[in-house]
């Protein structure tokens, strides 16, 4: 984990439980967007990848970055209570997710993981704790599957 997160005052608090944590969360989701960007560069050199699939992932990257801006800009209205992991554990999961994307050679695997992350970004909203918990559990399983 990078030094930004090691100095966070919120590591032991529940994930998504304050507007400050939501802002840190949005910044941390950039790890996944950056990993996707790097994977797209790597994928672009593969001749067996359809341009339609690659373009869809480029669009997913833009969508994810847009969603992060929404989380940052509307952090006061995105707090979710009742999430079953700490902010620190969530940051670790995002780091694992970025690694999974970077190490994958399968555009289908990358697309699936990015889709789950995008759904999670959308679900960070008051009262959506059951959905958020489900998506976190699903993402944990997904990034630990063989690449």
Image (cartoon, rainbow, N blue to C red):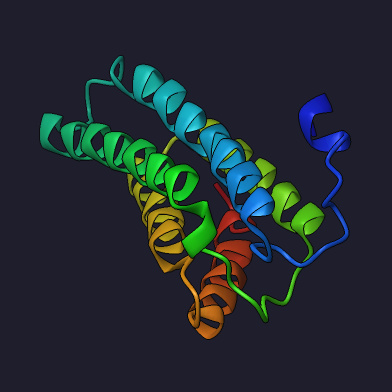
- Left or right? Give the position of 6 relative to 109: right
> 145 or 81, which lies in front?
81
- Left or right? Give the position of 28 relative to 48: right
> Which quarter of the image is occupied by the N terminus?
top right
- Residue 90: x and y in percent read 70, 56
- Left or right? Give the position of 92 relative to 127: right
Q: Quadrant of residue 39?
A: top left
Task: Tell which residue pokes out farthest to the left in this image.
Answer: 52
- Residue 54: x and y in percent read 22, 32
Q: Is residue 98 above or below residue 20?
A: above
Q: Quadrant of residue 13?
A: bottom right
Seen at 35% across and 25% down, the residue is 40
- Residue 95: x and y in percent read 68, 41
Seen at 52% across and 34% down, the residue is 30
Q: Is residue 57 above or below residue 142?
A: above
Q: Is residue 124 above or below residue 44?
A: below
- Residue 98: x and y in percent read 58, 38
> 128 or 101, which lies in front?
128
Q: Quadrant of residue 121?
A: bottom left
> Looking at the image, how many numbered discs can be counted on the residues?
0
Seen at 51% across and 30% down, the residue is 35
> 104 or 1, which lies in front?
1
């Amino acid at each position: 984990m990078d030094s930004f997160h090691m100095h966070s005052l919120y590591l032991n608090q529940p994930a998504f439980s304050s507007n400050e944590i939501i802002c840190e969360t949005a910044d941390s989701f950039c790890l996944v967007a950056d990993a996707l960007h790097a994977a797209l560069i790597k994928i672009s050199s593969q001749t067996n990848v359809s341009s339609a699939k690659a373009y869809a992932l480029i669009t997913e990257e833009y969508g994810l970055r847009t969603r992060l801006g929404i989380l940052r800009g509307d952090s006061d209205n995105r707090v979710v209570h009742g999430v079953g992991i700490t902010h620190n554990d969530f940051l670790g999961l995002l780091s694992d997710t970025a690694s999974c994307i970077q190490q994958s050679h399968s555009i289908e695997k990358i697309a699936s993981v990015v889709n789950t992350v995008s759904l999670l970004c959308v679900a960070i909203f008051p009262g959506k704790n059951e959905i958020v918990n489900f998506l976190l559990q699903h993402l944990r399983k997904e990034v630990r599957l063989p690449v």
